[in-house]
Image (cartoon, helix red, strand yellow):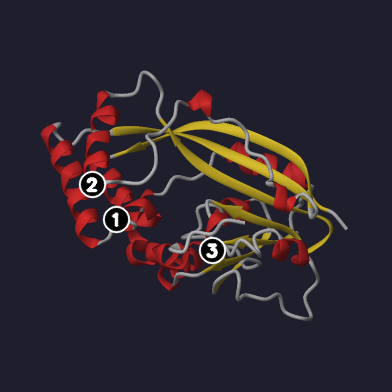
């Protein structure tokens, strides 16, 4: 299994901008969470462990549906914000820890589901599927979801023009694909001996940002952190100048949310 040697540094970077993360990170569509519960056979009161909850973008929708969520978050500031958002859900909790270090209490029963939303790639590859398998009851489910940035053919010209700023600073990765090019995602080979895939679905959606919030969102992204201090500052300044030249417009951002659910094998 391939591992990015920068993983430990980059995954700790989100905590530096917890307030911006809370305000600007997209939330998966409600239908994704409804389908997750239906496919996994979850009912109110079931115990779910969430990997890397951030500030609760998925934790709150899961708790709102009656699940008892144990959310594990590495960043102390991110965890504090998530904890405050869960104040009205007494059966849910946020634990400040890496998922690798966190352990289920010896007296606790195996859990009904393990959920990772935009977070599984930050977990040690050797534990990404093996540890959820150990935590789950027989027949329990692991659900993996991600929000993939996309760019429709009729997107505003800004989205094509801003790619020059990405190119100049050496931002890693390709420009966002067209929505139709993002298909359902399946469990990888290393999960095949542990989980039987029971669902793989996609959910196109859009999010509306002020220009200021979009710029703040860029500052929370791992790709920006990976540039290092000088290049990330240069990148954000370039995008800021471009937004300023356009009068700080409101921006519509396209995404495809992906949900993959696997049922635990013996």
Q: Residue at x 31, y 46 (%)?
A: 171
Nearer to me, 174 or 72: 174
- Residues packed near mark 2 inside 10 Å, few (<14), some (14 to 19) or many (20 plus): some
Which callout, 2 or 3, points at the residue further toward the start of the chain? 3
> Furthest-front residue in view?
2
> Furthest-bottom residue in view?
106
What is the distance, in whole Å, between disc 3 and disc 1 at their CAs?
34 Å
Q: Residue at x 59, y 69 (%)?
A: 99
Q: Secondary structure at mark 2?
A: helix
Where does the C terminus fall, quadrant-wise?
bottom right
**Residue at image mark 3:** 86
Residue 20: image location, x then y, percent:
33, 56
**Residue at image mark 1:** 227
Residue 225: image location, x then y, percent:
33, 58
Q: Residue at x 24, y 54 (%)?
A: 232
Nearer to me, 118 or 79: 118
**Residue at image mark 2:** 169
Q: Say whether marks 2 and 1 touch (CB < 8 Å).
A: yes
> Furthest-top residue in view?
154
Q: Residue at x 11, y 34 (%)?
A: 245
What is the distance, in whole Å, between disc 2 and disc 3 at their CAs?
39 Å
Q: Which mark is residue 106?
A: none
> Is residue 79 shown left or right of residue 41?
left
Q: Secondary structure at mark 3?
A: loop
What is the distance, in whole Å, between disc 2 and disc 1 at their CAs?
8 Å
Count of numbered circles on the image: 3
Q: Say whether marks 3 and 1 touch (CB < 8 Å).
A: no
């Amino acid at each position: 299994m391939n591992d990015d040697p920068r993983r430990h540094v980059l995954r700790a970077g989100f905590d530096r901008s917890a307030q911006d993360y809370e305000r600007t990170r997209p939330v998966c569509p409600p239908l994704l969470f409804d389908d997750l519960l239906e496919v996994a056979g979850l009912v109110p009161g079931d115990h779910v462990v969430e990997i890397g909850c951030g500030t609760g973008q998925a934790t709150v929708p899961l708790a709102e549906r009656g699940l008892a969520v144990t959310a594990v978050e590495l960043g102390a500031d991110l965890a504090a914000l998530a904890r405050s958002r869960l104040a009205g859900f007494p059966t849910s909790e946020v634990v400040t820890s890496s998922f690798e270090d966190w352990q289920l209490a010896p007296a606790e029963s195996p859990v009904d589901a393990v959920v990772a939303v935009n977070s599984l790639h930050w977990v040690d590859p050797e534990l990404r599927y093996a540890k959820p398998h150990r935590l789950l009851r027989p027949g329990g489910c692991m659900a993996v979801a991600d929000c993939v940035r996309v760019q429709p053919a009729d997107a505003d010209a800004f989205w094509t023009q801003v790619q020059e700023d990405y190119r100049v600073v050496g931002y890693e990765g390709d420009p966002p694909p067209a929505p139709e090019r993002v298909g359902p995602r399946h469990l990888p080979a290393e999960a095949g001996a542990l989980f039987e895939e029971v669902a793989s679905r996609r959910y196109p959606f859009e999010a509306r940002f002020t220009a200021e919030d979009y710029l703040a969102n860029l500052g929370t992204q791992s790709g920006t952190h990976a540039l290092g201090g000088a290049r990330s500052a240069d990148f954000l300044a370039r995008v800021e100048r471009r937004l300023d030249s356009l009068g700080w417009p409101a921006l519509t951002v396209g995404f495809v949310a992906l949900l993959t659910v696997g049922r635990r094998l013996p």
